[in-house]
Image (cartoon, coloured by chain):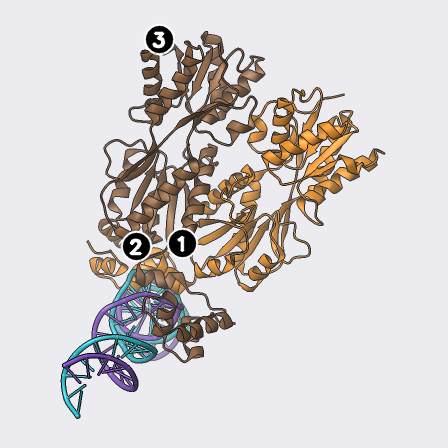
Chain colours: A orange, B brown, C purple, D cyan
Amino acid sequence: MRKVTIKDVANETGLSIATVSYAMSGKKILPPETVKLVTNAIEKLGYVKNISASSLVSNKSNLIGVVIPQTEPGSVMVFENPFYSEILSSIEYNARLQGYHVIVSGTNADEKYFTLAKQRNMDGVIVIGAYPEDFYEGLNLSNIPIVLVDSYLENHEYKEVKLDDIYGGYIATKYLIEHGHNKIAFMSGKIKDGGVSEKRYQGYKKALKENAIPVNPKYVFNGNVDFEEARILAKRIVEETDCTAIFCMADIMAVGAIKELNKMKIKVPQQISVMGYDNLNIANYCTPGLTTIGQDIFKKGKMAVDLLCKAIDNKEVEQEECVLPVEVVERESVAKL
Amino acid sequence: MRKVTIKDVANETGLSIATVSYAMSGKKILPPETVKLVTNAIEKLGYVKNISASSLVSNKSNLIGVVIPQTEPGSVMVFENPFYSEILSSIEYNARLQGYHVIVSGTNADEKYFTLAKQRNMDGVIVIGAYPEDFYEGLNLSNIPIVLVDSYLENHEYKEVKLDDIYGGYIATKYLIEHGHNKIAFMSGKIKDGGVSEKRYQGYKKALKENAIPVNPKYVFNGNVDFEEARILAKRIVEETDCTAIFCMADIMAVGAIKELNKMKIKVPQQISVMGYDNLNIANYCTPGLTTIGQDIFKKGKMAVDLLCKAIDNKEVEQEECVLPVEVVERESVAKL
DNA sequence: TATTATTGGTTAAACGTTTCACTTAAGTCT
DNA sequence: AGACTTAAGTGAAACGTTTAACCAATAATA
């Protein structure tokens, strides 16, 4: 049972290889009966085209890479934050609709990812999350179209889809204030310039200032953006402050906080209110349901794919940025004082 | 800036293309200084090999496909059940360690996935979950090594990694009985012969019988395996039965049940106990923490990759099956009566 | 009618590797 | 010294496509 090639289809139909190729690709219009002849033969022989071969000559692989951060070098779980699965899901779906397949890689960015992308002849790459500077340098050299998602990179020349995070932090905090809170803790990842945490923190501060509430550095807590760390921080917030509300910059942290508060028999939201950010599925799973800042993750993935496809087709290099809206989604984790 | 090929490396070093290829692959031992010469030139020129080309001739792509069910045809979210993200994460990690890249595809199985696998010259495919019969037929034709994960397919000839689900259902139910419950609802997906639900149901019945508790068909509830459906079923269980415990055949359902019970102000576990199955991360996120049947998902992914690699290397066709152990992981969702 | 376009198709080069079969030079054995 | 082995490297075919350049026959135009 040898492998069936285009040559076999040519023999079967009595046509040349070239004609068969044209018939399949439609790059040259042929009479319908010829096309029919070819498709019949393909069906009969069970021919499937070899993408390695076509990719070699056409220099197009219909493959896009998706890079997801691996929080700790050598860490195992790629998808520590469910946000990554959710957006990956959307990217995979939308890419498939456009005829692309997706290669996912967790990377801690010290392996040179873009070597790989070139090896595979990838048509484009979607980079999710933030990475160290030198990662983007390697990325620069490769001539592969790139779309960043939530990179929080400053002054870059890439296409990007992201959120208005200052605004998100702002409306979250404003919502809490409007519900009568003025002692509001801010729980986040490490705050570094231009990063997610910093952006949302800016929004937090803005809302406080607007309402003449002093920014208390004692109310700011940071650590890794994960469930366990959030529990620790939540405990500290209870023990070290008199806050009535916690604004967590990620749902996964908010869920950790709620878990810990529940465990400490502190009623959410009666005693402490919790506000999240992302609107992941888990925001709905926990009790009480998490009031959070909603983003349309499906759309985010779709935009990333759309932008990338455009870049692939047009080969245009101009930067393009897409800022998606955010809004408060109300559930039950915030009390009116 | 033309693309750098092996030819350029050959020119740079003054060696032939063949020698460069051998130096890189190590398939022929060459003097260290020659190898060094080559690696230096590669570094200098920034050469990366074109996998399309090598795949074409060597017939090896270092690519494996992972198929994940898309619950409803045309549905968007591929990863409705976090189980899929968790195992995908493990598969991606372990495959990468072995030098493979992973292409994920959601599929509702009516698209002929294996055409795609052949097109891409995939070295192997890991199929997660259960699919309609005809999906496996297409799979048969392709000569690509396959590993199934949780297929619940009867009498097949593929390699597979799965759980002892009858036993899992058994120990879950036994645990509940030992905690004083004898009115135990069973919540699951559609029960069809050989499926997951049926297996776990068998275990459930076995435990009941062993303890002389009659099996009450009124206590069995099924629907889609998702969060929302589980809420509906939980409500019905409360309204239609006098059960003191619910055994959910998947964590995602258990979490839905807990959410609904919380909403109905029914205390878990004081009034109703809930037992899950899978030990996903979300089992830890919810309150009360979900007591569940634990499986080692990382190991499951690793086994799948190992089995597949073995199949790829040895081209041996004998079936191989790997049944991973399960155990009760205690948290707080089951009360002692 | 002579000229030009169009239609339906073919030939063959090119893509960038791997690898089999071969050569040449040097080393080893009797 | 002659025969044999080994080491280091080369030439070129092969993998399965795409596509530019070309051709013959028919249809359209002047």
Q: Secondary structure at mark 2?
A: helix
Q: Secondary structure at mark 3?
A: loop
Between the C-alphas of marks 1 and 3, the distance is 52 Å
- Name the residue located 41 percent from the left edge and 9 percent from the top edge: B182
Task: Give, as a three-letter code, the residue at label 3.
Answer: Ile
| Figure quadrant of residue A283 | top right
Q: Note whether B211 is above or below A160 in the view shown.
A: above
The picture places residue B76, in percent across and down from the top left corner, at 47, 36
The picture places residue B123, in percent across and down from the top left corner, at 33, 51
Q: Are marks 3 and 2 in contact (CB under 8 Å)?
A: no
Q: Are marks 1 and 3 in contact (CB under 8 Å)?
A: no
| Labels 1, 3: one chain | yes
Q: Residues within 10 Å of mark 2 (few under 14, many from 20)?
A: some
In this rendering, the label closer to the viewer, 3 or 2 = 3
**Residue position for label 3:** B213
Q: Residue under mark 3: which chain is it in?
A: B
In this rendering, the label closer to the viewer, 2 or 1 = 1
**Residue position for label 2:** A35
Q: Residues within 10 Å of mark 1 (few under 14, many from 20)?
A: few
Q: Is residue A164 visible?
A: no
Q: Residues within 10 Å of mark 3 (few under 14, many from 20)?
A: some
- Give the mark, 1 or 3, whose residue is nearer the N terminus: 1
Q: Residue under mark 2: which chain is it in?
A: A
Where the C terminus of chain A falls, by quadrant?
top right
**Residue position for label 1:** B99
* Residue A239: mark: none
Between the C-alphas of marks 3 and 2, the distance is 67 Å
Q: Left of A148 or right of it: where is A7?
A: left
A274 or A103, nearer to the observer: A274
The picture places residue A119, in percent across and down from the top left corner, at 44, 61
- Name the residue located 60 percent from the left edge and 59 percent from the top edge: A134
